[in-house]
């Protein structure tokens, strides 16, 4: 049992983060068992009075197999995929390579305070399975998918439809436990046949499985989808093959008509907004106000490797900076990297908040020396996170940071 004397911010809604000043967080094994005012505490305690605590961060969209190509620049999606991404993902067919990159990636997630993530790997069973094996060995929490591409893909990467389906379903059956789950991962419409997407949609509906893909990121990509499928919109392609559902997470979703927003809303699909990536690749500005107005669920993803870092506070800051008019406030910045993502994953009864009975997935940040710890500390954490030192990152009560 630990009793941590500290201060904290608990995300409640896009409008509200509760500031908890001078409290005791009591942790028993994996769970938060009590949060109360210090004045009501009796007995021993650990001194973290110069710190603030947040829930562990959740990354809703990240490509493990692209971890080492961050920052290798190509100024548009399709040439970047061809020249940088595909040759890198091809390396993860080698189990030894896949093991090392998985290990490096998981350690880097923890160093940045990410305690749950939703992961794309590469178009090889070896890559996805090694990501699961290492996650199991290291105690990582994630949903992980084998990236699927059965058309318009380079030699040596293009899967047969049968390979894509069979291995996805096998991995889905093999890896389901308290820490890990599968997510069906058709890469995006340009590299996925209608049959593949339809079969995934049918299986996922029957088994209530999660699905992730990319949607309407870039104008050239959207034109290509129009040529290939001839539908009224990109979103309509996914709707018609049955990929939209309350357990579907769509990366980007930048260039959308009102009719497309209605399809997302009616299907209760969710969006992974990736602001850093959207401006790195010059994809465009996320229509945050329109999406919020529609009541479509969305959270934040790093989209590493088009995103340059796994640091979710950096992405929260980018969410603010990459809106030219709409000012995103600190309460929403915290919410979108914690509770919003937990709700999209159906895990808000376990993670994404600070409450008795939730998992002890916590970040403990040391506030810069001499700074006050007040309501405004959340704003400072969001906008100048570089100056806050992560002292502990707890996953189910266990500190995942290396001892220095
Ligand atoms: N669209 C299809 N594949 C990818 C990818 O790997 N990254 C991004 N940002 N967009 C994609
Ligand atoms: Fe992506």
Image (spheres, helix red, strand yellow):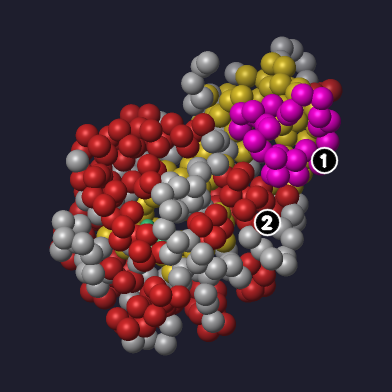
Q: Are marks 2 and 1 in contact (CB under 8 Å)?
A: no
Question: Which span is picked out in magenta?
Answer: 363-390
Based on the picture, tell me whether residue 288 belongs to the magenta stretch: no
Q: Is mark 1 within 8 Å of ligand 2?
A: no
The label shown at residue 250 is none
Viewer-proximal residue among 231 and 115: 231
Q: Residue at x 27, y 60 (%)?
A: 148
Vertical order, 231 against 181 (above or below): below
Q: Secondary structure at mark 1?
A: loop
**Residue shown at 69% from the left, 26% from the top:** 366
Instruction: Name the secondary structure under disc 2.
Output: helix
Determine the image quadrant of residue 167.
bottom left
Q: What is the quadrant of residue 195 in the picture? A: bottom left
* Number of other residues with Cα within 10 Å of mark 1, as a class: few under 14, some 14 to 19, many 20 or more: some
Query: Residue 156 location, x and y as percent?
Result: 16, 56
The percent position of residue 130, horizontal first and vertical second, equals: 26, 39
Q: Residue furthest top?
A: 44
Is 35 located above or below residue 155 in the figure?
A: above
For marks 2 and 1, give the CA distance: 19 Å
Q: Which residue is mark 1?
A: 375
Q: Mark 2 or mark 1: which is in front?
A: 2
**Residue visible at 46% across and 68% down?**
217
> Which residue is denoted by mark 2 in the rendering?
320
Horizontal side of residue 367 vs 304, given as left or right: right
- The answer to whether residue 248 of the structure is visible from this angle is no
First reached walking from the N terminus: tag 2 or tag 1: 2
């Amino acid at each position: 049992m630990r009793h941590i004397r500290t201060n904290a911010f608990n995300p409640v809604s896009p409008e509200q983060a509760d500031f908890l000043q001078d409290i005791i967080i009591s942790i028993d094994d994996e769970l938060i068992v009590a949060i109360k005012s210090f004045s009501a505490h009796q007995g021993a305690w650990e001194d973290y009075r110069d710190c603030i605590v947040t829930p562990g961060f959740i990354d809703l969209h990240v490509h493990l197999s692209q971890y080492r190509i961050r920052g290798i620049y190509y100024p548009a999606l399709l040439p970047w995929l061809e020249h940088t991404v595909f040759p890198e993902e091809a390396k993860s067919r080698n189990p030894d390579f896949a093991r090392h990159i998985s290990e490096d990636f998981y350690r880097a997630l923890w160093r940045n305070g990410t305690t749950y993530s939703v992961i794309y790997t590469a178009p090889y069973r070896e890559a996805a399975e090694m990501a699961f094996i290492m996650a199991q060995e290291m105690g990582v929490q994630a949903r992980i998918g084998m990236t699927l591409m059965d058309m318009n893909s380079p030699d040596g990467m293009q899967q047969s439809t049968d390979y894509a389906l069979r291995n996805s379903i096998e991995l889905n059956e093999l890896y389901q436990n308290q820490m890990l789950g599968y997510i069906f991962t058709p890469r995006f419409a340009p590299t996925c046949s209608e049959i593949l997407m339809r079969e995934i949609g049918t299986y996922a509906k029957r088994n209530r499985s999660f699905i992730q893909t990319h949607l309407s990121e870039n104008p050239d990509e959207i034109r290509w989808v129009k040529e290939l499928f001839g539908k009224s919109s990109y979103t309509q392609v996914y709707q018609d093959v049955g990929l939209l559902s309350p357990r579907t997470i769509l990366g980007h979703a930048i260039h959308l008509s009102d009719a497309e927003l209605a399809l997302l809303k009616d299907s209760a699909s969710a969006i992974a907004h990736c602001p850093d990536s959207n401006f790195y690749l010059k994809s465009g500005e996320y229509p945050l106000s329109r999406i919020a107005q529609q009541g479509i669920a969305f959270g934040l993803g790093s989209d590493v490797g088009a995103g340059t870092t796994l640091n979710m506070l950096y992405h929260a800051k980018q969410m603010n900076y990459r809106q030219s008019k709409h000012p995103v406030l600190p309460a929403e910045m915290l919410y979108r990297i914690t509770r919003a993502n937990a709700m999209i994953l159906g895990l808000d009864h376990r993670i994404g908040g600070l409450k008795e009975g939730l998992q002890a997935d916590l970040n403990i940040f040391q506030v810069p020396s001499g700074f006050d710890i007040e309501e405004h500390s959340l704003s400072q954490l969001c906008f100048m996170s570089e100056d806050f030192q992560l002292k502990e990152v707890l996953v189910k009560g266990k500190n995942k940071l290396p001892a220095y």
